[in-house]
Amino acid sequence: MIIKSPPLSRRTVLRGLGTTMALPFLEAMAPAAWAADAGARPKRLAIFYTPNGMMMEQFRPAASGALELPPTLEPLQPFRDRIAVVSGLGHPMAAAMGDRPAGHGRSCPAFLTGTHVKQTEGPDIRCAISMDQVYANHLGEATQLSSIEAGIDQASLLGSCDIGYSCTYTNGLSWRSPTVPLPVTANPRTLFEQLFGDGDALDENGRLAQLRRQTSLLDFVKEDAGRLSGQLGAADRHKLDEYLDATRDIEKRIQRAAGKQASQNAPPLESPAGIPDSFNDHVRLMIDLQVLAMQADITRVSSFMLGREISNRTYPEIGVPDSHHMLSHHGFDPAKKAKLALINRYHMEFFAYQLKRMAETKDGEASLLDRSVVLRGSAFGDPNLHDHMDLPVIVAGGLIKGGQHLQFPRGTPMSNLLLTGLHALDVPATSFGDSTGPLGGLTVA
């Protein structure tokens, strides 16, 4: 009689010298019947946000139905059948409603909440719980971290960032409650420590010493990893090796950035170790960290701001030395519009990179993308008009019907899409924000 070993616990971690490291999903962690059922795998939510609106004539497909990709969307060609463009969605609650005429301070916080925020420059901020946090609450304690909030820009100083609106409203997207915004992490090393715990195990001097020694987290768990590998089948061993290689690659990239900054004698408190000089390298590193976190099931919810709202970043690497925010108020100048379109397309290349990384990262026999809802959007359509009633929205992943352009009447609540996303993630919500009902034709049966 053959006695089968019980499944490996889903909570199994690698241990060594005070360090623990989460593992990706392995077939050994599930009974054979469950492992073969892709529908039983965890579902994930990823938000990808870009600031300062969009050149809509370069973004919006010409016709509804089968998806044709206009210039801004051309980087998404490899994923055409996995994405849906949804037009006509807006945030009516981002209107002034008697408040002072400022757009960014209302539209950005409305993006994931569908609410009208309180106009204030002080600490008495008020918004609403965001869609990603509704899903995080639904998952409960299923993962080590309920969610991660990543970005590229450090938070603005306290005070007003838009007319009469606190910087809190434009620094991030996620709200745990109407009065508790979740801060964005822009330093890759800080995010890595959130995922793997180095920041709790080492003080500042210890972290700097580790950077100088180029020590790897994997050095501490090497023995335990070898022991576990011997218990796994060939497919699981290969998956474990891929995961450990990806982790070490990210560590090396963070250490290279930290080493370069250290050589420039940058004060560590003013210039945190781990932020690459290159915008391209920084963005890709932050995306890879989010994918790694989902691969290891450290979290199933992530949001990523490619830039803070009202960002004045310049992009000389693509031939645009002008301020992004200033270009967004183009005044219909053809030269400025062309430069803004270049920025929009450049940003779309990073969204394509995130989809690629999720598609090539295995989750059982499928991929992370197959069991995810990925939402890409901005708080404005035409930024020159501060138009919050026709937003540039893309939904991707295996839980939605791709290869299509869905066109709804202008001003259809964006909250209807957020509610639809929650339903795709098995959250039994009947409403969200200012929703009037879920959108039809978007989710798979």
Image (cartoon, rainbow, N blue to C red):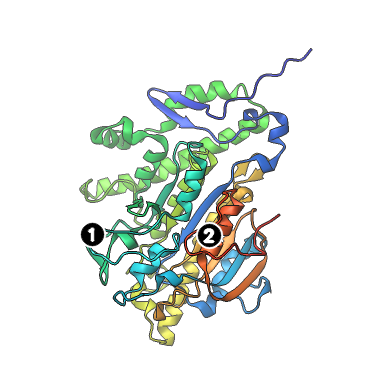
In this rendered view, identify the residue nearer to me: 373 or 208: 373
Outermost residue to the right: 1
Tag 2 and tag 1, C-beta contact below 8 Å:
no
Q: Amino acid at mark 2?
A: Leu
Please give left or right for residue 236 compared with residue 203 in the image. Answer: right
Horizontal and vertical percent position of residue 308: 35, 62
Please give left or right for residue 53 compared with residue 186 in the image. Answer: right
Q: CA distance from mark 2 to mark 1?
A: 30 Å
Outermost residue to the top: 1
| Rendered image quadrant of residue 227 | top right
- Above or below, 227 against 44 in this view is above
Q: Which residue in the structure is indicated by mark 1?
A: 157
Looking at the rendered image, the quarter that the C terminus falls into is bottom right
In this rendered view, identify the residue nearer to me: 162 or 192: 162
Q: Amino acid at mark 1?
A: Leu
Horizontal and vertical percent position of residue 262: 26, 45
Which label's residue is closer to the chain start, 2 or 1? Answer: 1
Q: Which mark is residue 421?
A: none
Q: Nearer the viewer, mark 2 or mark 1?
A: 2
Q: Which mark is residue 418?
A: 2
- Above or below, 233 against 74 in this view is above
Horizontal and vertical percent position of residue 323: 33, 73
Can residue 370 be seen from the camera position used here?
yes
**Secondary structure beneath disc 2?**
helix
